Image: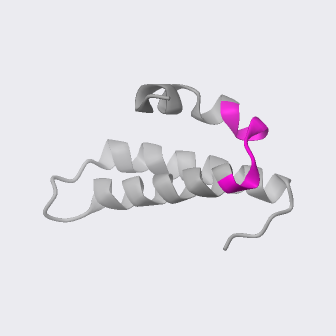
Amino acid sequence: MGRWKLHADWYADLASLSVEQLRDRRSLAAQRAAHAAARGTGRNPKAARQWRQMLRAVDDELLRRGIRQA
């Protein structure tokens, strides 16, 4: 699956993913949010905000399933 597909269906796919896939997505979103806000790499506040929203969506889905964060 291409990255564009991942981003386009990020929110719609959350309910159908396994716990391992959700954790992978959480890791990806956290990493991308950190890189978008990092110094010396050309900060991109809009991208950082979008990745944080995606991270919160994954966290919300994990909480809905009653799974604690690692």
Q: Nearer the viewer, residue 40 or 19?
A: 19
Q: Position of residue 2 (x, y in %)?
A: 44, 28
Query: How many marks overall?
Result: 0
Q: Residue furthest bottom?
A: 70
Q: Quadrant of residue 17?
A: top right
Q: Is residue 34 above or below residue 36?
A: below
Check if residue 48 falls in the magenta segment: no
Q: Position of residue 45 (x, y in %)?
A: 31, 49
The structure residue drawn at horizontal position 25% and vertical position 63%, both measured from the top left corner, is: 38
Q: Position of residue 57 (x, y in %)?
A: 64, 47
Q: Nearer the viewer, residue 1 or 49?
A: 1
Q: Is residue 40 left or right of residue 4?
A: left
Q: Is residue 70 above or below residue 57?
A: below
Q: Is residue 40 above or below residue 28?
A: below
The structure residue drawn at horizontal position 75% and vertical position 48%, both measured from the top left corner, is: 18
- The quadrant of the image that shows the C terminus is bottom right
Q: Position of residue 16 (x, y in %)?
A: 77, 36
Per the picture, the main secondary structure of the magenta-coloured stretch is helix
Q: Is residue 68 left or right of residue 1?
A: right
Q: How is the image coloured?
A: one colour
The boundaries of the magenta stretch are: 13-20
Q: Is residue 46 left or right of residue 40?
A: right
Check if residue 15 falls in the magenta segment: yes
Q: Is residue 51 left or right of residue 66?
A: left
The structure residue drawn at horizontal position 21% and vertical position 53%, both measured from the top left corner, is: 43
